[in-house]
Each structure stands twice: as C-alpha cells, then as structure tokens.
Amino acid sequence: MNRLQRLLNSSVGAKVMVATTGLLLFGFVIVHLLGNLQIYRGQEAMNSYAKMLHDLGPLLWLARLLLLAIFVVHLGLAIRLHRANRQARPEPYYVQHTAHREPFHQRRVKATRMMVITGVVILLFVLFHLMHFTFGWINPQAYGKHDEAGRHDVFGMVISGFQNPAITLTYVVAMLLLGWHLFHGAVSTLQSLGLTHPVWRPVVEKVLWALLIFVVVGNCFIPLSILLGLWPPGG
Amino acid sequence: MKLTLHIWRQPDRNSPGRLVTYQLDGVSPDMSFLEMLDLLNEQLASSGQDPVAFDHDCREGICGMCSLVINGVPHGPLQGTTTCQLHMRHFRDGDHIYIEPFRAKAFPVIKDLVVDRSAFDRIIEAGGYISTNVGSAPEANTIPVPKEEADTAFDAATCIGCGACVAACPNASAMLFVAAKVAHFAHLPHGQPERRRRVLRMVEEMDRQGFGNCSNYEECEAACPKEISVKFIAEMNREYLRALCSPAADQV
C-alpha cells in the first residue's frame, strides 16, 4: 500500500498515472475508431460487429467499468495536479512572456495551457455521445430499430444521426479538440514515463503522431462523409 | 543610454509590493545588468532613498545567486546567460525594462527583488549528496567512468541552483532542478549506493515545499542559464518509478 499511495500522492507518481491512463484512453479511442470503420463495410458488417460486442455480456460490463475507472483516475489526478500548479504561483508576473522562440513550441505551450479546458469539453462530449448512441436520447426516432436479421440496427442509427448537420458539427468540433488535447498529451506521456532512449524515443514519437492524425481524421471523416452524402452509396 | 526601469518594490515578506518607475541616465552599454542596478542604487542612496535590494555574489555566472525576471524572462533575454553576465548592449537607448523577482509560493519575497530560495537547500538536504568520507584524492583510474556517462553527469552537474527553472515554469515547478541533481549522481559510480533512496527523498521533499508539477512546457530549459535539458526530467521520472519498485521504497 505504501507504494500505491506514493504513486498516487507524489508529483512524479501522479504524472505517471495521468500518462498511463491517458495512453490507455488513447488506445481505446484507436480501437473504437477501428470498430467504427466497420460502417464502410455496410449494414451487415456493422450490425454483426455491434451484436458481437453486445454478446460479450459480463465481459462487456467489465470493460465498461475498467474504462470508467481509467477515466476517473485520469481526470481526478489531472485536476489535482492542475490545482497544485495554480497554487504554486499565487502572484502572477506583470510581464507574461515565454522564454521559447520557436513557433512550434509556442503552439505546444498553448495546447498545454488548454489541457483542462479541452479535457472538460471532451468529458462533456463523451456524455453527449453516450446520450446519442447508447441511451438514444439525442436522436430517438432512429434508436432501437432492428434490421432484417433481428439485430439492433446500429448502421441505420449512425447514418440517421450524422445526416443531421448539428450533430455532425458537434462530433467534428469535439474530435478537433481531442486532437488538440492529444497534441500536448500524446508525446508528453513519453516524458512522464521516462522514455529517453536516443533511438526509440523519436520512433515512438512518430508512431504517436501518426496515430493522432489517424484518430482525428478518421473520426471526423465518418460523420462528414455521411452528412455530405458520400456514404452510404445512393443513400 | 537612458532607460526607464519598472522595478518591483516590496518592503518585506508580508507587505504588498508594487512596480515603481525610475528614470536612469548615463548607462554604459558595457555595464552588466547588475552594474546598471548598482548605478541606480548609488543615485537612490545619494538622494536619501532606499536602494533596490537584489541578490548577487560572484558576478561570474557560476554561483547561482543572481536572479531577476527581466521583461518576463528569468535572467533576461540572452539565452544561456545569468543576469550578472547580461550586458546593457543587449538593450536599446530609451528601452522600458520590467524587473520582477522570481515568483513562486516556495520562493517567498524577502525584500524587493530578493527571494528566499532555501526550499532548494531543503531538497538538497533530503538527498542531494553522497555519504562517503572525503579523504585525500584517490588515484584517478581506480574508479573507471565511461566518457559518455561522465559527459551526461556533467551536463546535469552544471546546474548552479539559481531557480530560474522555477521562475520560468508556468506551474512554478522545480523538476528541472531536482532532475539535474538526481541525474548528476545517477550517472556516476559514487552515486549508486544511495541512488534509489535519493530520488524518493528528493522528489517527495520537492512536493512538500509547495512547488508545482511539470506539464512539459519546457520553459525551464529555455530559461536555464546552463541550458540543462528537460530529458533529465524524463530520467528523474524513470528513476523515481524504478525506486518505487525497489526495496528502497520500504526504507525511505
């Protein structure tokens, strides 16, 4: 217990936990996107994928609880660190100036300053997303329908949802903010977890940047392609 | 050169401070920043006013005593330079210069531009040392140290403990300072016996002193007069994790 307490209470330990849970959430978003891309394989593939997930039963609930726990730890520790950071400088400087000169770095500084705000917006979006597709409150007329095989018609629900410009806009804005959040977060995890290897660090950074672009482009492409009538063909 | 100085004046720790404007004429471009302040203080003293209090000692850029946040940047606009080694030729005639103390909860202002940096001393007391008796110098080759390790240790050991990293960090975090000390010892054979204990104690003492946490702004690296890399912060994080998994975590 001594070790776990120190991991959660110390500055370095809390940073490590925020990084680890952040990477796990990033991993979840990637897998989630891979699942969502089933929509381009048609109604049959999408609905049978959704049924497969639902048929996991208790395993699905275990995964949901685990995800919730990861989310709570990530958010809770990040907010605690943020509060400590604000308290560490009670009196601000009269002249606010960055010691850095490169534009790329200054953009990263902006993203870093926005972490709590983008994080909270992403939390609100996750709630909206659950209300939309899991609880069926946002677009109720498309919720709870079944396809010819008697499966829950996820395909139809998604298509109907994203044909609404307001819903699509919400998703696209949220995904851009997620990208901004990860612009700081993705590579910062390597710093917090202490990866300094001269060969591996640049390689892992490039992989993370590629995954970040994949997540943002992929998640924006799905709703936009549906709104613009590119998918389903002839739909 | 003629300058307009906006200097933070605060009579003591518990009184509120404010920026006071002074006009200073006759500044030579060859003066150091501190010599410019000396000139101001001579004028203030001769007119019966209280001179501006500021920290300084060696004036050679190696002691870590001088501080000051000049136009929003610790140690001023010149990269890799302490305030005492900053010369007035880097400013222009007629410039307005804002001079503030290092600001952090863990660095309370004592007077004007002087802050109490003994929080750093308490972190060093917690583990920034090796517990061997110092006798006469041993034969140079009895403890072999690979060149790369010695270089890395020295890159970290150039830290003069001035606190510019804390002053520059938007979170007033001391992690670059602590990381430099941890890495300095971790790369040398002499640091090995206390390696795990040291990082646990120093990090936890740093937390107790009320510094913020690293958010990877990397402002510290840009402001550090010794240009110490933030890679040492990653290294400290790794050292802390490894120490937490070692038997040392039961002893400290």
Image (cartoon, rainbow, N blue to C red):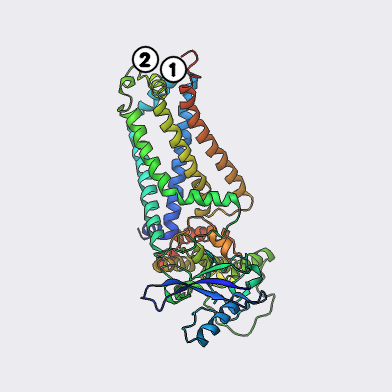
Q: Residues within 10 Å of mark 1 (few under 14, many from 20)?
A: some
Secondary structure beneath label 1 = helix
**Residue A16: x %, y % from top left:** 45, 53
Q: Chain of mark 2?
A: A
Q: Is residue B234 left or right of residue B29?
A: left
Residue B61 seen in the current view = no
Total marks in image:
2
A44 or A76: which is nearer to us? A76
User: In the rendered structure, are the residues bearing label 1 and label 2 in contact, judged by CB atoms less than 8 Å apart?
Assistant: yes
- In the rendered image, the quadrant that contains the N terminus of chain B is bottom right
Q: Residue at x 50, y 86 (%)?
A: B47
Q: Quadrant of residue B153?
A: bottom right
Q: Which mark is residue A157?
A: none
A81 or B84: which is nearer to us? B84
Q: Pointer 1: what residue?
A: A43
B98 or A65: which is nearer to us? B98
Q: Residue at x 37, y 41 (%)?
A: A123
Q: Chain of mark 1?
A: A
**Residue A215: x %, y % from top left:** 50, 35
